[in-house]
Image: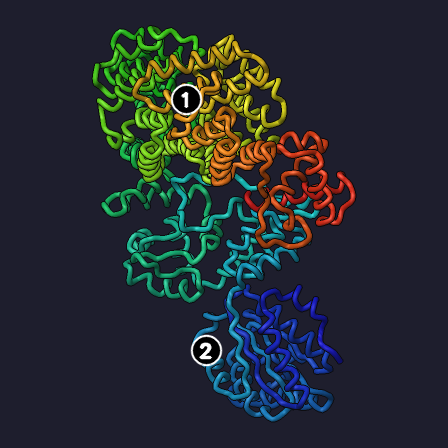
Amino acid sequence: MGNPPQGRRVRSLRGRDETLERIESFLRGLRRSEGGILTLEGPEGVGRTSLIDWTCRTAGSMGIGVARASADELLRIVPLMPLYAALGESPPPMEAVTDGSQRLMSSIGHFRSRVEQRLLEHPLVIAVDDVHWSDPGSLLALRTLSVQLRHRPVAWVLGRCVGRGGGAVDRLFDSLHENTTTTAVTLSPLDDGALLELLGDVLEASPSPEVSSLVGLTMGSPRLLVELVRGLLEEGRIRVRGGRAELDTAPTASVLFHDPRAAVPPFPLPRRFRSELERRLSYLSPGAHQLLQVGAVLGSSFSPQVCAEMIGESVAGILPYLREAVDAHVIACGDDEALEFRHELHRRAVLDAIPRAVRGALHREAAEIMLRHPHSTFHGVQHMALGARHGDGDAVTVLGQAARDHVRSAPEISAELALRALELVDPGSEQAADLTNTALQALLRHGPLDRAIDIGNQALERTASGPRRSRIQCALAQAMLLAERCEEARDHVDSLLIDPAPPEDVRLDAHLLRVQSSLAATGADRLDPAEALRGAEHARTGSAAWSTAMSMARWKVGDVEEALTVLSETAGDGEGLLPDATPLRPLLHAELLLAARQTDRTVDLLRSVAEAADSYGWRVPLTCAQALWAEADLVAGRLDHAAERAAEVVRAAQEVGLPSCARRGHGVLAAVATHRGDVGESLAHVARLRPGNTGARFRGLMGRRGGPEFLWHSIRALDADGEQERARELVRTVVEEDGAQRLMLVGGPTVGPWSVRLALHGGDRATARRITTEAGRLADRNPNVRILRVAHDHTRGVLDQDVGLTLRATEAADPWSAALAQEDLAEVVGDRSAAVTCLETAMAAYTSFGAGQDAARVRRRLRELGVRRRHWSSSARPSHGWESLTDTERAVARQVAEGLTNRQVAGRMFLSPHTIGFHLRRIYRKLDIHSRVDLARHVHVNSAAHEDSVR
């Protein structure tokens, strides 16, 4: 008779192939009349019982007799009960034998005779699971008979949970392991790979990344994983749709009460799973249960001194209970003189079993104890927050002070503490106003800003006039301005400025906010400088507020040089990086440095701001700094870094509530996509640049068509898409209605020459002249900002076909501007050899940036001059399938899948339709397809796979 099918083996016992081979070898020896002992030991739930079941089934398939049973804690009073149960019999009555020892030996002898009788028919496996629950007589019988029957074809398969049963069980297994015929198997927890395979078996579907993460919660236990997944399926938290399993998570716990070292499941424990965990702990003594309950309240890691004090014992008094918990593999001794739960699931199961009211009282008691010791003060604050009730004045004092102490160093925790304290006081009280202001200051640093706005609006409705209300209103205006609710912010600022006697710091902040709101809420190119600077003049000359307000106003009207001078005169680059909730000054300084194309100084400053913000958990300024940093990466030609950073900025900005940063991120992603030749992706990001998509409320230029970022990226994307006439029309409209100056400040030094070139190609010399004039005005206003002068020279060089000016522009500090100047110089240099040199220099730069679209544009012009350059990579790749496609072929495939014709794709990629057809035939052959419909399906499948891999 053969072995069980391999497929069945692998499916039922994932990750145990080596163990199964050892068991099969053991059973083959039994078929040769070689007896022996097989011990299976491991933690509970590790798969021991499943292995014993598999062993018995395999033995049966080999023609070996099987006797199988499990010891039962409740039947320990009956001697030899598990052994007789394995034979399907009951122990014989022994009333005639009065001596207890004699009765036991008689029972063992009787059992041996029954085994001998079975052996007359065939070899025999006697399997006993849960040996740790066996009675002393059974332990003695196993030790005795394994020796007496060692030369008979009988195999003893014995399983136990390590750490249970006491010394008698340990001595039995130690004795058995000394036997040369014993095969000892120690079962370790399964690795994640085996658990993932088991997860797929249980679900009969492909798990999402969130579902796959469940394996990390189960301590390597296949039983816990099965119970967890089945429980989540029963309660509807895992849903299987179209062969894919998705997890519906619950809101995560407050960071204030979260131990970052603990693997906390993002959902309530399923009932059946919780029952399984409780069952595992049911054999512990009442004293050990109490220790676990108090420890669970104290946290994932807890002090033995505090635990003992809450129980009312000395540390020495809880040692027996601690030993039980350690032996049960529930508690371990940590590295920092603390006790800790081996797994958060154990703690959650114990904690959930404690009534809520009792938990609260225990937290309050723990807080009183911990607050008496300086080394545990913060943990005391945590427990105070969990255990306090409304009207608890001491708790409000403790929480409020802790919130104020942590506004700068840990704003997320500060906000949670302040908001928890707010729940304990009357809404209209002075305490409530102070706590609200603390919460707002913390949220301005960490976000989310919409939460700050909601809290601030609610507080204003119930707070009387006075300094407390002024502070709340000022913080609310800051949050609204950051969230681009500019008109509302300005209303609050105006209200503050008519207050006859606001606090001095509030007055200064209000004037700065007035400048910010004025600049944000009007079209920058129509801005009245007097209006912009009025608020700045109200601040003290030379102060940080004054320099910031003055620089903002000057920057917005095009005075880059003066704005930089004001900032540089009042402080160095590295001073005061995070002076307040929104470190506007260093961020503004970085933006000005970037506009002046002092890229290295920009990155140094942004790195300092980002490191400081990250160390404090200030997500709002960190996101702002990263958004500017993504632009700096783009300016420096680091497209991969720019795209990666911008994608993270978009995600963080959505979480925090910073629409301006989200737009910056989408702008960078649009530019990267344009440079790489993915026009469809570029247009998708451009669409997200409209203020209407982010909730902003602007007038003038910003309200009609979107801001200058939207306009410039739209122009570039339309041009790359072959829509030059639409791009020209947009340039013409912007110049005629609003002027090009702000567009140049945002888009950088390539805006002027690119727009002029675009206008000239359409025969619109008037628009080209006006752009050049405005570039000259901008350069004249900033005589020491070299990049603006270079941009003007470049723009004039394109307009007037001036070789000298264009040549001067090739030395620009901006690498994109320098490369573009090489392109334009090739147009006017008048010598074929020199033109080829210029174009090859430009193409080398674009290639080093990874700017495939720009390189393709230059390559086309080289072809027109009779020079051909390869544009595909010869790196090793498969011969068939999606991975076999070159970058160029993938670009063609994606655009054909969008429904574009060969001619349209050719226009986008600066290739001929014949070349696109050639690429398409190669694509069809590599993918073994025959139609554009098949190609669209391949593109869709591989795009979805890519999204999953980066999710």
Q: CA distance from mark 1 to mark 2?
A: 91 Å
* Residue 255 or residue 768, whichever sits in front: 768
Q: Which mark is residue 660?
A: none
On the question of residue 450 being in view, the answer is: no
Residue 595 percent location from the top left of the image: 38, 25
Residue of label 2: 170
Q: Quadrant of the N terminus?
A: bottom right
Residue at the location (44% across, 17% down)?
796
Residue at the location (61% across, 59% down)?
197
Residue of label 1: 805
Residue 51 percent location from the top left of the image: 61, 71
State which quadrant residue 75 falls in.
bottom right
Helix, strand or loop for disc 1: helix
| Position of residue 313 in the picture relative to residue 453 (left or right) | left
* Residue 483 or residue 585, whichever sits in front: 585
Check if mark 1's residue and mark 2's residue have beta carbons within 8 Å: no
Residue 544 percent location from the top left of the image: 25, 21
Q: Quadrant of the C terminus?
A: top right
